[in-house]
Amino acid sequence: MKKAVKTILLLAVLIAFSTTLSASANRAPFQAVPILPENQISDRAFYDIQIAHGKTQDLYLVLKNDTLDDIDIIITAVTATTDASGKVLYSQKGYPDRSLKFPFESLVTPNPSTVKVPALTEIETSVRLNSPGSRYEGIILGALHVTTKPSESDTPGIINSFAYSLAVRLTSELAQNIAPDIVFEGAEFFAGQRSTGFILDIRNIVPELFRYTELTVDLYSENETVFSNTMLIDFAPNSFYPLTLIANRSVPPGTYTADITLTVREDTFYFSKQFIVYDNDNDADIFLELLLPQREQAPGVHPAVFPLWMWLFPFILIAAMIILIIFMYKKKRQEKKTVKK
């Protein structure tokens, strides 16, 4: 009995240990935490600061190396944009609208910067923020994208890279509510080997972030409505939104109309554009599927998130082993009592 108990406990410890190691191997090897400045204008966990034009300010952050090796961390400033699924993109360079006067990456020096963090060490570092030289309205939105240099893993062809995006919102001294101004630039048809569909070009041409914008799109040909849907999207300041509609079949030639209605705060914008798809020798019916947006987390610190079960599994396993041992012990005692009788 004692030998069986020892064997079960040993197996439980080994499995729990191996699971913990696996989870730790997939963790980000470092941490990046913003140090919020004195001119922070909200209680948000990201840099939300008011800064006048022509000013210079250092943005400080803490970098913590949780590994046994020295690591090089790269800090890159990027401008927030709107991606094809209607999310505000903070993690990489997107496609800002041509109305953008002050890209965030142009205000940060050096960009990018590289910081070496010794093993098991926490250091404080900074980047220099130079606000626009002339007066600016609204907000400038971007992020400090903090990542390790890509490294090859033990598996050939697999590249490990971990990153944090620390959002930065700059508000001008001209604090005011800027009225929405949305433009429907037009529609494009595309046909390739893998996909066919339409791209509707929508632009936010003002320096303001618009969240939970209700967008309704109706796409129809001369004979029938081929697509209709309503969704919520987010618009980064001065950003270009390529609303993409994918067809799962070839698109028949003909004239198409795209009607778009956007409700931004208390304002409603309505657009209608016609475009022609020329004969492609295929009259198959069209069916469009919208790439539905996923909700974006609020701007802030977004480290890698790992499934909860990976952390709970070792404890659940040990608890199950303990219950099994108790059950076996009681069963053994009951058998002994039965034999004595």
Image (cartoon, grey):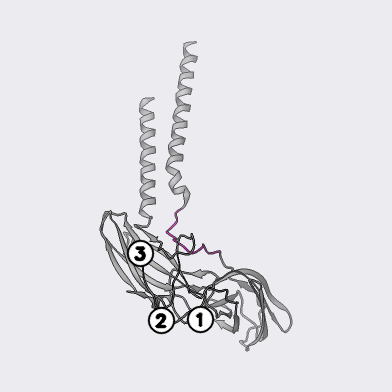
Q: Secondary structure at mark 2?
A: loop
Query: Cβ–Cβ below 8 Å for labels 1 and 2?
Result: no
Residue drawn at 49 percent across, 19 percent down? 334
The residue to which callout 2 is attached is 133
Q: Secondary structure at mark 1?
A: loop
Q: CA distance from mark 1 to mark 2?
A: 21 Å
Q: In the image, what residue type sits under mark 1?
A: Asp
Quadrant position of residue 154? bottom left
Q: CA distance from mark 3 to mark 1?
A: 29 Å
Query: Cβ–Cβ below 8 Å for labels 3 and 1?
Result: no
The residue to which callout 1 is attached is 97
Quadrant position of residue 263? bottom right
Camera-side residue of 327 and 111: 111
Q: Is residue 327 left or right of residue 125?
A: right
Q: In the image, what residue type sits under mark 2?
A: Gly
Magenta residues, start to end: 295-306
Q: Is residue 149 visible?
A: no
Q: Is residue 225 visible?
A: yes
Residue drawn at 29 percent across, 66 percent down? 115
- The verdict on residue 145 being magenta is no
Residue drawn at 45 percent across, 56 percent down? 305
Please identify, in this view, whether the residue under mark 2 or under mark 3 is nearer the observer: 2
Query: Which of the marked residues, 2 or 3, is nearer the chain's N terminus?
Result: 3
Q: In the image, what residue type sits under mark 3?
A: Tyr
Q: Secondary structure at mark 3?
A: strand
Rendered-image quadrant of the N terminus: top left
